[in-house]
Amino acid sequence: VQLVESGGGSVQAGGSLRLSCTASGFTLDSGENLDDYAIAWFRQVPGKEREGISCISSSDGSTWYEDSVKGRFTISSDRAKNIVWLQMDTLKPEDTAVYYCAASPGRGYLSRWEDEYFDWGQGTQVTVYS
């Protein structure tokens, strides 16, 4: 599966951004689609490990959020368009990072662990200034 992120940029603290992750390369002959994957958003600050912040299972709509973004970020998906969004509200300077989306095969499955994701996007920079 190929993943392409978009929507990053610079925003003042308290503002909002919406990141998009567009998935392609499904094995159409087998009927494979976004439902067959967990899609997660990770972020990484220079010098720190990449951390999982949110995940969605499109097959059943289940979601997970890391505590630092819970209540501020919302993950959603459009199964027809193979897009996963991350709506980020009330942004803080500590949200500044490169944001990546990643895919892990499995239905009804959520994971925050980087090692369980095999397909990654190229990343998009989010900068929040005070």
Image: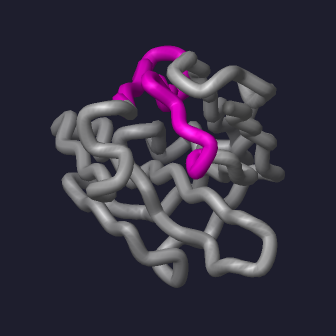
Task: Give the residue displayed 77% in from the left and 80% down from the top.
Answer: 47
Q: Is residue 99 visible?
A: yes
Task: Give the residue displayed 35% in from the left and 40% down from the top.
Answer: 35
| Magenta span includes 78 | yes
Span shown in magenta: 74-95
Decide which of 72, 62 is in the foreground and name it. Answer: 72
What x and y, as percent, mark residue 83? 54, 26
Left or right, 123 with reference to 83 = right
Left or right, 120 with reference to 117 = right
Q: Can residue 1 be seen in this view?
A: no
What x and y, as percent, mark residue 120? 69, 59
Decide which of 55, 12 is in the foreground and name it. Answer: 12
Task: Give the residue displayed 43% in from the left and 63% down from the top.
Answer: 105
Task: Give the residue displayed 72% in from the left and 33% down from the top.
Answer: 129
What x and y, as percent, mark residue 73? 38, 33
Dividing the picture into quadrants, the one containing residue 63 is top left
Look at the picture and state if 106 lies above or below 14: below
Q: Which residue lies furthest to the front in this view?
A: 130
Dividing the picture into quadrants, the one containing residue 21 is top right
Left or right, 24 with reference to 95 = right
Quadrant housing the C terminus? top right
